[in-house]
Image (cartoon, helix red, strand yellow):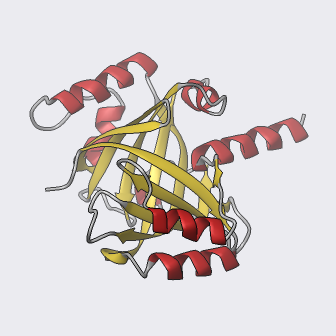
Amino acid sequence: MAKTVFERTEKKYRLSAAQYEAVLAGMLEHMRVDAYGETTICSIYYDDHSDRMIRASIQKPVYKEKIRVRSYGVPDSDTMVFVELKKKFKGVVYKRRVGMKLTEAESYLDGGEPPGESTQIIREISWVRDFYKPVPRACVAYDRIALECPEEPRLRVTFDSNIRARSERLSLACGADGERLLPEGERIMEIKVPGAMPLWMCNLLTRNHVYPTSFSKYGTYYQKLIAKEQNHV
């Protein structure tokens, strides 16, 4: 059964092509690529008409939240996708998600009834939906390689490349294309860990001069859109 509740610390790092090659090689001495290999992840981010959630998020508050629909690959109307509520409080990420067909997810976030029984996760997502009355605002897609650790299943590392986004055709069924957000070869690494990072990993990052950074895919795209609007004023 797919996991529906997540609580963990997530740290992000922006890697050059050379850093990626070195760090990946070091990680693979202790970890392995998970069973999915490289996957394309697509998300539709929802917000109200004034973009209240993302505007608050880029101010780096103590608490922030996002609501989105996520798929692995480009879905059709009957493909299972995930409606996700992602919260961050004092550096800890809390994620709730529920699976449903794409058409059901789009109808639900448009104010319809959720399919199936009412669960605690559905009630949490519905409260945020009813408070913000969100609509689709951006599509973000990227290609991901995920590593898992046999000794510590809760430790995961992901590398995201070819990050792109668009503000039109806001359905997951419309494809994974969009405007590139990073220069060619750069990647965003995320380390998802339930507690302290292993010493070998700390040493690997230090040797390769890799340091934490703040990077939001949706936030980066939103700021690019704002910059374009200001340049056209």
Residue at image point 31% right, 74% down: 36
Nearest to the observer: residue 25 or residue 93 = 25
* Quadrant in the picture for residue 231: top right
Position of residue 82 measured from the top left corner of the image (x, y, whole percent): 30, 48
Image mark count: 0
Is residue 178 among the parts visible in the rendering? no
In this view, the residue farthest toward the top is: 131
Position of residue 171 measured from the top left corner of the image (x, y, whole percent): 44, 50
Q: Answer with left or right where residue 49 lies relative to residue 72.
A: right
Residue at image point 61% right, 58% down: 13
Task: Say which quadrant the C terminus sits in.
Answer: top right
Position of residue 217 measured from the top left corner of the image (x, y, whole percent): 59, 50
The answer to whether residue 98 is above or below residue 212 is: above
Is residue 139 among the parts visible in the rendering? yes
Q: Answer with left or right where residue 138 lies relative to residue 147.
A: right
The answer to whether residue 151 is above or below residue 9 is: below
* Quadrant in the picture for residue 57: top right
Residue at image point 47% right, 69% down: 200
* Quadrant in the picture for residue 53: top right
Nearest to the observer: residue 45 or residue 187 = 187
Task: Say which quadrant the N terminus sits in.
Answer: bottom left
Residue at image point 40% right, 17% down: 131
Q: Answer with left or right where residue 183 lies relative to residue 191.
A: right
